[in-house]
Image: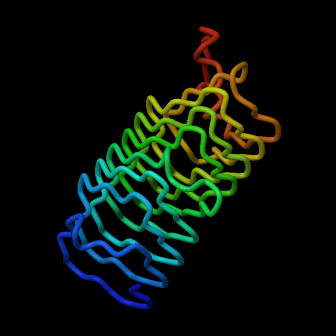
């Protein structure tokens, strides 16, 4: 089990992967389209890595940070939901799938999240700072106390999502009303 190790500019294949990584740093590494099933990542950081289209059946992510990573189409849906603790900064999460996950308190900072699927996820107290959420899917999602005050391009139907004490800017109110065909003017 690698511990406190840095991996730089590596192209990982399925045979290169260990079952557990602790306190590791992955910099400019490629995991593109890999099945990361049953791997445990504990207190790891991924910086400028490509994890696009990865599958994660029973993958454990405990206190993992993603910085400036390409994660297009990544499927978090089947990862280990019990230890799940993630944060994202400046990541491309277009069409990422978070369906049904407990992402309570998750930080999303400056991320491209067009088409991401948050259906049935728990995003209570999550923070979407300066994130582009165009065509992101929110259906039966718990968004209580979530902060969307600097997020943009979102379309969230208050009828089908829990929004109690969620935070929105005045300019973002349009994203809550689009399903009602209400016209908002300045």
Look at the picture and state if 161 lies above or below 82.
above
Q: In which quadrant of the rendered view does residue 67 lie?
A: bottom left
Relative depth, front residue between 25 and 90? 25
Look at the picture and state if 28 lies above or below 99.
below
- State how the image is colored: rainbow
Q: Residue at x 53, y 32 (%)?
A: 154
Q: In which quadrant of the rendered view does residue 39 lie?
A: bottom left
Look at the picture and state if 185 lies above or below 60.
above
Q: Residue at x 44, y 89 (%)?
A: 3
In the shown orientation, is residue 165 left or right of residue 142? right
The mark tally for this picture is: 0
How far across and how far down the image is residue 12, in percent? 21, 69
Q: Quadrant of the C terminus?
A: top right
How far across and how far down the image is residue 73, in percent? 34, 43
Q: Quadrant of the N terminus?
A: bottom left
How far across and how far down the image is residue 46, in percent? 38, 71
Relative depth, front residue between 118 and 18? 18
In the shown orientation, is residue 94 left or right of residue 155? left
Q: Residue at x 58, y 48 (%)?
A: 150
Q: Residue furthest right?
A: 165
Q: Residue at x 43, y 91 (%)?
A: 4
């Amino acid at each position: 089990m690698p511990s406190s190790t840095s991996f730089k500019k590596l192209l990982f294949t399925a045979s290169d992967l260990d079952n557990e990584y602790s306190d590791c740093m992955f910099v400019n590494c490629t995991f593109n389209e890999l099945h990361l099933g049953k791997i445990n990542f504990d207190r790891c950081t991924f910086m400028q890595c490509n994890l696009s289209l990865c599958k994660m059946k029973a993958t454990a992510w405990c206190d993992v940070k993603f910085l400036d990573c390409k994660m297009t189409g990544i499927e978090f849906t089947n990862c280990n939901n019990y230890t799940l603790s993630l944060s994202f900064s400046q990541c491309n999460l277009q069409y990422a799938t978070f369906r049904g996950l407990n992402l309570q308190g998750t930080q999303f900072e400056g991320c491209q999240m067009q088409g991401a699927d948050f259906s049935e996820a728990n995003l209570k107290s999550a923070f979407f700072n300066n994130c582009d959420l165009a065509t992101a899917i929110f259906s039966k999602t718990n968004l209580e106390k979530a902060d969307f005050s600097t997020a943009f391009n979102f379309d969230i139907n208050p009828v089908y999502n829990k929004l109690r004490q969620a935070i929105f800017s005045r300019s973002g109110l349009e994203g809550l009303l689009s399903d009602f065909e209400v016209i908002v003017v300045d």
